[in-house]
C-alpha cells in the first residue's frame, strides 16, 4: 500500500513539475516572496469540515508541520481537520497531502505545491521545504487565516495553482540588537514568527554591547549583575546630551535563550549569537575591569557611538572569553558564532606598554595585526569545538583568520575582497539593509538614527556583485538586514522599522534577481499589509508617501523639484501651503520653483489619499547663499 501511494504521488508531481517548468507565468499570485515558478489554474480548493490532511506518522517533522497547519485552521475556522496516515491516501478528493520525496533539484528548502479543486499536494525533499510550502499556502488563503481567533463568514478557499519554489540564497537573515534596548521573549517569538512567514532562516541575535551585556554567563555573574544595567539613557538624538536619569537594563537567562533557540528551530530558523570582541566591550570591562586596558572606572555606556574600552590580550582575558564561549556553545548549536570585530578603537592598545610589548614579542607590525592575532586565537578555539566564526568586515584588517566568514556592512567592498579570497560572505550593507535608517519624510518619521532607506531601495538590492566571477560568487551565502535599537526603545518602534521592509528583503534573498519584479511587488504588498494589520503589527505606511526631491540650480537661482512616488497612483500637489486634495493639480513633470515655496504632495487612488501628505519648504543651501 505504501509503495502504491508513493508511486501515485510521484507520477502526479513529476507531471506537475514538467508542466511548471514548461509553462510561462500567468496572472498575479499574491504571495511574498514570489515563488520561482508558478502557473495559475482554474477553480479553487475549498477547505471545509470534510477536508482531510495526510502525513507519514513515522516522519515526526512532517507530522509536526501538518499538525501546525491543522492547529492554525482550527484557530480561525473552528474546524478540527483530521491528520491521517499517508498510506491511507488513495487519491481521495478534499485532501491536503504532505509528502517527502527525494528530489535533488529542490535542495534542502525548496518545494512543489499543487492546488486543484480536488486536492492540495505538497512535495519537498526535506521537511523545511514542506514548512515553507505551508507559509505559501497561508498567503493563498484569505488573509484572515493569520488571526488568533475564530473568524466567521470567510470562504476558506485556495486558488488553483502549480508552484515550484527554490530559494536563491542559503543565508536569509534578520538581526536584532539587544544591547542598546532589550526585547521581551514574547516580542522575539513574534519576530521569529514573521521571519518564518517571510521564509527567512537566520536570526542574528546581538547579545553584548557597550550599553549592556544581555546573556547570563554562570561562571561570570557580574556580566549581568553589573554589565546588564546602565545608569541612564540618552534622550533624543545623539549629541543632545540629555539623559533620562533612569537605570535601564535586563538580560536573558540561559533557559530563556534556549527557549528562543528551540522556538526558532521549530520554524526552521538558526539563531546566530553575537558576542562582541575585542571592541564594543564596555559593559564587560565594567563588570571585570581586569579585562580592559585602563585603571579608570568603567561603567556601561549611557549614550551611543564607539567607545575606547576594548579587551586586552592577556592570556587571562582569552581564558575568560573561552569560558564565555563554552557556555554560549552549550546554548546555541549554530555552525557560526558571530564575534563582532567591528569598531574597535586602538587608542588604549597604542597607549599600553603591555600591549606594545605584546606586539613586539609576537613580531607583529601594528595594532591592526594584533586584532587579527586576537580574532585568529578565537577562531582556533571555536574551530576546535566544531564551530566557525563570522564577523563584521573589519576582521579583514591586519589579515583575515583562515576559516572566517565575513559579514560586509561598510558597503560591499569587504565582502567582495573576502569572496575573492575564498571566504564565505553575508552581504549586509548599511546603504540597503540597515533597517534602523529612516524610510520617509524626516518631519513625519519617528526618531531614528537618520539616513533614508525606502522600500524600493531595499527591493533593488542585489547580494551577488557583478564584479565576482562565477566561482567567486559561490562564496556569497546570502544577505541580512540589521535592526540596531539605539532609537528603537519599544516593540512598536522596532516593528515600524522592520515592516514592510522585511517583505522586500524576503524577495531579495528568496526570489533572487531573476524573479524579482518591482511592479508585481507593488500589486502584492497591499494584501501583505492587510495580514500585518490583522496580526497587530505596527507597520510603516510611508510606502504611500511622495518623496520631494529638490535640487538647487545656482545658475538660474531656482529649484528643480521632482515628486517621486514609491507606489502607483496619482500625485497631486500644492505650492501655497494648503493641503492637497483630489482637486489639486496632478504632477506630470519636474517643477521649476523659487526659494521659499512650500511644496506639499500626496498620492491619490481616485479620491482616496494613500499615506500622508509630505511637505518641504525650499531653502537655498548655505553654501549657495
Image (tube, helix red, strand yellow):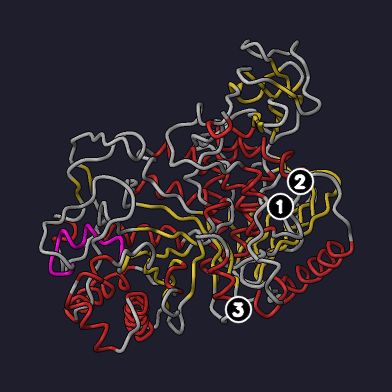
Question: How far separated are the C-alphas under marks 3 and 2?
Answer: 38 Å
Crowd class of label 2 (few under 14; some 14 to 19; many from 20; radius 10 Å): many
Give the x, y percent position of residue 591.
75, 25
Front residue of 57 and 243: 243
Residue 169 vs residue 464, the one in the foreground: 464
Residue at mark 3: 420
Segment colored magenta: 279-292
In the image, 377: left or right of 560? left
- Viewer-proximal residue among 385 and 267: 385
Q: Earlier in the sequence, mark 3 or mark 2?
A: 2
Residue 605 lies left or right of residue 488; in this view the side is right
Q: Residue 317: where, in percent of width, then height?
A: 20, 75
Badge 3 local density, few (<14 within 10 Å), some, or many (20+)?
A: some
Q: Secondary structure at mark 1?
A: loop
SS class, disc 2? loop
Q: Earlier in the sequence, mark 2 or mark 1?
A: 2
* Residue in the picture at 24% in, 45% down: 302
**Mark 2 touches mark 1? (CB < 8 Å):** yes
Q: Main secondary structure of the magenta part?
A: helix
Q: Is residue 100 above or below residue 26?
A: below
Query: Percent position (x, y) of residue 477?
Result: 58, 70
Q: Quadrant of the C terminus?
A: top right
Label 3: element kind: helix
Residue 80 coordinates in the image, percent (x, y): 55, 45
Cα gap from disc 3 to disc 1, whole angstroms? 31 Å
* Circle number at residue 34: 1
Seen in the picture, residue 384 relative to 280 is either above or below; the reply is below
Pick whichever of labels 3 and 1 is earlier in the sequence: 1
**Mark closer to the observer (3, 2):** 3
Query: Marks 3 and 2: CB-CB under 8 Å?
Result: no
User: In front of the other: label 2 or label 1?
Assistant: 1
Amino acid at each position: 500500500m505504501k509503495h502504491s501511494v508513493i508511486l501515485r504521488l510521484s507520477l502526479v508531481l513529476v507531471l506537475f513539475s514538467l508542466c511548471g517548468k514548461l509553462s510561462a507565468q500567468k496572472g498575479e499570485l499574491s504571495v511574498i516572496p514570489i515563488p520561482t515558478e508558478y502557473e495559475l489554474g482554474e477553480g479553487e480548493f475549498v477547505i471545509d469540515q470534510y477536508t482531510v490532511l495526510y502525513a507519514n506518522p513515522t516522519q515526526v517533522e512532517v507530522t509536526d508541520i501538518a499538525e501546525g497547519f491543522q492547529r492554525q485552521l482550527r484557530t480561525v475556522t473552528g474546524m478540527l481537520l483530521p491528520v491521517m496516515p499517508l498510506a491511507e491516501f488513495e487519491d481521495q478528493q478534499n485532501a491536503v497531502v504532505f509528502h517527502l520525496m527525494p528530489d535533488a533539484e529542490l535542495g534542502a528548502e525548496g518545494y512543489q505545491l499543487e492546488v486543484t479543486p480536488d486536492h492540495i499536494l505538497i512535495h519537498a525533499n526535506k521537511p523545511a521545504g514542506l514548512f515553507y510550502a505551508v507559509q505559501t499556502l497561508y498567503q493563498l488563503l484569505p488573509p484572515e487565516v493569520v488571526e488568533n481567533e475564530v473568524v466567521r463568514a470567510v470562504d476558506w478557499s485556495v486558488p488553483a495553482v502549480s508552484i515550484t519554489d527554490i530559494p536563491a540564497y542559503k543565508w536569509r537573515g534578520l538581526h536584532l540588537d539587544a544591547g542598546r534596548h532589550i526585547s521581551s521573549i514574547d516580542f522575539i517569538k513574534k519576530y521569529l514568527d514573521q521571519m518564518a512567514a517571510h521564509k527567512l532562516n537566520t536570526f542574528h541575535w546581538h547579545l553584548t554591547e557597550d550599553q549592556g551585556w544581555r546573556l547570563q554567563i554562570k561562571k561570570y555573574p557580574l556580566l549581568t549583575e553589573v554589565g546588564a544595567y546602565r545608569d541612564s539613557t540618552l534622550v533624543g538624538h545623539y549629541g543632545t546630551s540629555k539623559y533620562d536619569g533612569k537605570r535601564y537594563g535586563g538580560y536573558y537567562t540561559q533557559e530563556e535563550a534556549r527557549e528562543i533557540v528551540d522556538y526558532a528551530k521549530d520554524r526552521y530558523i538558526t539563531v546566530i549569537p553575537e558576542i562582541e570582541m575585542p571592541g564594543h566591550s564596555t559593559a564587560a570591562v565594567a563588570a571585570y575591569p581586569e579585562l580592559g586596558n585602563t585603571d579608570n572606572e568603567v561603567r556601561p555606556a549611557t549614550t551611543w557611538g564607539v567607545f575606547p574600552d576594548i579587551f586586552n590580550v592577556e592570556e587571562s582575558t582569552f581564558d575568560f572569553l573561552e569560558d564565555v564561549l563554552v557556555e554560549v556553545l552549550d546554548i546555541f548549536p549554530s555552525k557560526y558564532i558571530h564575534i563582532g570585530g567591528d569598531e574597535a578603537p586602538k587608542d588604549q592598545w597604542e597607549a599600553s606598554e603591555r600591549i606594545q610589548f605584546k606586539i613586539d614579542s609576537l613580531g607583529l607590525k601594528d595594532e591592526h595585526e594584533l586584532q587579527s592575532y586576537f580574532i585568529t586565537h578565537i577562531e582556533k578555539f571555536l574551530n576546535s569545538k566544531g564551530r566557525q566564526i563570522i564577523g563584521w568586515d573589519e576582521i579583514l584588517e591586519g589579515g583575515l583568520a583562515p576559516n572566517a566568514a565575513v559579514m560586509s556592512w561598510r558597503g560591499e567592498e569587504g565582502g567582495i575582497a573576502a569572496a575573492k579570497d575564498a571566504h564565505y560572505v553575508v552581504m549586509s550593507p548599511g546603504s540597503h539593509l540597515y533597517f534602523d535608517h529612516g524610510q520617509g519624510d524626516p518631519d513625519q518619521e519617528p526618531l531614528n538614527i537618520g539616513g533614508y532607506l525606502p522600500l524600493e531601495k531595499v527591493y533593488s538590492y542585489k547580494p551577488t556583485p557583478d564584479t565576482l566571477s562565477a566561482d567567486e560568487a559561490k562564496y556569497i551565502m546570502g544577505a541580512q538586514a540589521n535592526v540596531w535599537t539605539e532609537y528603537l526603545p519599544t516593540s512598536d518602534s522596532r516593528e515600524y522599522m522592520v515592516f514592510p521592509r522585511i517583505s522586500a528583503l524576503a524577495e531579495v534573498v528568496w526570489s533572487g534577481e531573476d524573479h524579482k519584479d518591482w511592479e508585481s511587488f507593488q500589486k502584492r504588498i497591499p494584501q501583505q499589509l492587510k495580514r500585518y494589520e490583522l496580526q497587530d503589527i505596527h507597520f510603516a505606511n510611508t510606502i504611500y508617501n511622495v518623496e520631494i526631491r529638490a535640487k538647487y540650480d545656482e545658475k538660474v537661482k531656482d529649484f528643480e523639484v521632482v515628486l517621486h512616488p514609491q507606489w502607483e497612483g496619482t500625485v497631486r500637489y500644492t505650492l501655497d501651503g494648503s493641503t492637497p486634495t483630489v482637486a489639486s493639480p496632478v504632477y506630470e513633470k519636474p517643477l521649476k520653483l523659487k526659494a521659499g515655496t512650500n511644496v506639499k504632495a500626496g498620492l491619490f487612488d481616485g479620491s482616496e489619499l494613500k499615506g500622508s501628505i509630505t511637505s518641504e519648504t525650499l531653502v537655498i543651501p548655505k553654501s549657495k547663499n
